[in-house]
Amino acid sequence: MSENLDLTPEAAVRAVMQDILGLDAEQVAAFTPDTELFGALPELDSMAVAGLLTELEDRLDIMIEDDEVDGELFETFGNLVAFTEMKAAE
Amino acid sequence: MTATLEYSRYEFQGNDELCLKVGGHHAQSILLIPPLFDEMNRMRRMLLDVMRLLDANGIGSVLPDLPGTNESLFPQQQASLAVWRQALRDCSNILPKCQHIASFRGGCLIDDFAKDMPKWRLSPAKGNALLRTMMRTRMASDKEAGLSTNMVQLTEEAQQGAVNLAGNSISASMFSELQEAVPSLSDDVRTAQLETSAHTGDIKLPGSALWLRAEPDEDLLLSGAIATNLVSWISS
């Protein structure tokens, strides 16, 4: 299995959002901490969220526990980045 | 891309399983191993595009359905990685022209049915990652129904016989195989990753990760890059 290249949590979140939502790099680069996610982006349904969490685990070599996932996590891009930064620092 | 699709079959444990063929008259063919579970549906259109592009380049290809998927009569709850490897062995036995394998995502977990055949892999997935996504999908649908489920409960349920995850009936043996499964190590493997991927690979391809999308889609940039790379790989 290939090794992960170094990737910051924020870059990983942007890359996964790009893949899941089918956006291009410029569109995802325009995401700010206040950009709303769940509920605001129709492509980001609960199935997509399932894939997103597993992809973040894979790309950042972290494990996300069931009880760490709540609605607030996906409210904004900033919340999601802050969570992954916290997990990556553990 | 006007290649003719041939709806063929192979026999597995007394049932006919579907097997799509394109360009059977060419001297060489590639056996394509599809992604597993939901990812297969999201990438099927792309795989067929790859098959048509290969045909335009003088290479045939074969895409078998795995027992228990699509129209298969094989009971889904009896499917396992071991069963799928055996099915691929049976299918491969009737395809003398297929001397190369191209496997996609979870398909890379079962391409070791043929130890000696050269393998090309796109974004190989670990079994546990597929399992965790399916468990999370089940947990999300339970939550919408007002139920609270967690991975520990689902793991226990699987051990008692079978568990339904995201529309798939996953047997105890499939569950435990997936927990441990990683793509086999082999000297003769070329691994392709997407340019957006964090993983290192032998080659990086442009295009999007269709397996992560909410709906099936096509991506001719990716299918074109895959076909071009497969053509250069098979001729090298």
Image (cartoon, coloured by chain):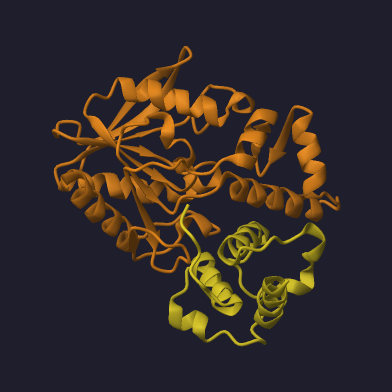
Q: Is residue A43 above or below residue B105?
A: below
Examine the rendering and report whether any part of residue A9 can be seen: yes
Looking at the rendering, which quadrant does residue A26 occupy? bottom left
Identify which residue is drawn at 52% across, 59% down.
B213
Identify which residue is drawn at 72% across, 61% down.
A64
Q: How many marks?
A: 0
Going by the image, does B97 lie left or right of B205? left
Residue farthest to the top, as pictured: B14
Where does the image place residue B32, in percent across and percent down from the top left? 35, 39
Where does the image place residue A12, in percent across and percent down from the top left? 55, 73
Residue farthest to the front, as pictured: B187
Quick one: which chain is orange? Answer: B
Examine the rendering and report whether any part of residue B5 can be seen: no
Going by the image, does B156 lie left or right of B174? right
Looking at the rendering, which quadrant does residue A38 occupy? bottom right
Identify which residue is drawn at 68% across, 75% down.
A80
Quick one: which chain is yellow? Answer: A
Task: Compare residues A71 and B173 and report the one nearer the observer.
Answer: B173
Where does the image place residue A8, in percent across and percent down from the top left? 57, 77
Where does the image place residue B154, in percent across and percent down from the top left? 78, 42
Looking at the rendering, which quadrant does residue A58 occupy? bottom right
Q: Is residue A12 above or below residue B93?
A: below
Identify which residue is drawn at 61% across, 65% down.
A56
Going by the image, does B46 lie left or right of B67? left
Q: Is residue B1 above or below residue A37?
A: above
Going by the image, does B191 lie left or right of B160? left
